[in-house]
Amino acid sequence: MVPSEENVTLADIGRDLARIRRVLVSTAALLFALEVLSWFLPIDAFGIRPRETIGLIGIVTSPLLHGSFAHVLGNVIALMIFGAMIAFKEERDLYLTTLVSIFVGGLGVWLLAGAGNHIGASGVVFGLFGYLISSGIIKRRIGGRLQSVFVFLGWGTMRFGVLPGQLGISWEGHLFGFGAGVLSAWISARWTRRATPKSASRVGRP
């Protein structure tokens, strides 16, 4: 969304919201459809298999695959909530964080995670979570800081998901996803600062 631009109308905001809703709903529908498909075809085998050449394909495919209906449902709910929160402020950052979480977070899992077949969109979920927690601090905006506090208070227990020792859970995926989200917030802040005219940053200075 671009609410800061001049001459933005309610119709423009409505179209932005409708587009974001379509993106999120379409993503949810795709994840559920693939979960149903996995009941008939062994597509869950295409997860990230650390340090195996064949496992590299899982960097792209693993966020689309889940171990159960409950697994995909939990991730879809989180994706919808966190995705909407990010896109409402800056739609570009939703796509940036998603891509960085998939590729950077996924590569981290492939390089350093324990042996196994890592699947699920939770790495992306933790990427969005990491972005929301850190962006207010990195971007130094009051609204962003308030949002970070709100997210921490509401979903702060998610931070324990990056700790080892949880049976059947890819804590490495959570950890690298969270780190990718923080990296995304930093990249976004850099883009924003570069796009801000230097003269504007000097306002109020002697």
Image: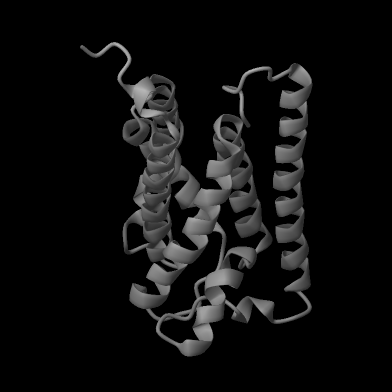
Residue found at x 38% / y 31%: 136
Residue found at x 38% / y 42%: 190
View extreme (left): residue: 206
Q: Can you give x and y, in whole percent of width and height, for residue 22 in the image?
A: 77, 43
Q: Is residue 95 visible?
A: yes
Within the image, what quadrant is residue 173 found in? bottom left
From what the image shows, is residue 30 above or below residue 5? Answer: below
Front-lying residue, 188 or 193: 193
Front-lying residue, 25 or 100: 100
Describe residue 177's horizontal placement relative to residue 64 as left or right: left
Q: Is residue 156 visible?
A: no
View extreme (front): residue: 199
Describe residue 46's horizontal placement relative to residue 148 as left or right: right
Q: Can you give x and y, in whole percent of width and height, for residue 84 in the image?
A: 62, 36
From what the image shows, is residue 5 above or below residue 139? Answer: above
Residue found at x 60% / y 50%: 74
The N terminus - image quarter: top right
Q: How many marks?
A: 0
Q: Can you give x and y, in whole percent of width and height, for residue 65 in the image?
A: 63, 68
From what the image shows, is residue 60 above or below residue 87? Answer: below
Describe residue 180's horizontal placement relative to residue 119 as left or right: left
- How is this picture coloured? one colour
From what the image shows, is residue 108 above or below residue 176? Answer: below
The C terminus - image quarter: top left
Q: Can you give x and y, in whole percent of width and height, for residue 42 in the image?
A: 69, 82
Residue found at x 36% / y 23%: 199
Within the image, what quadrant is residue 150 found in? top left
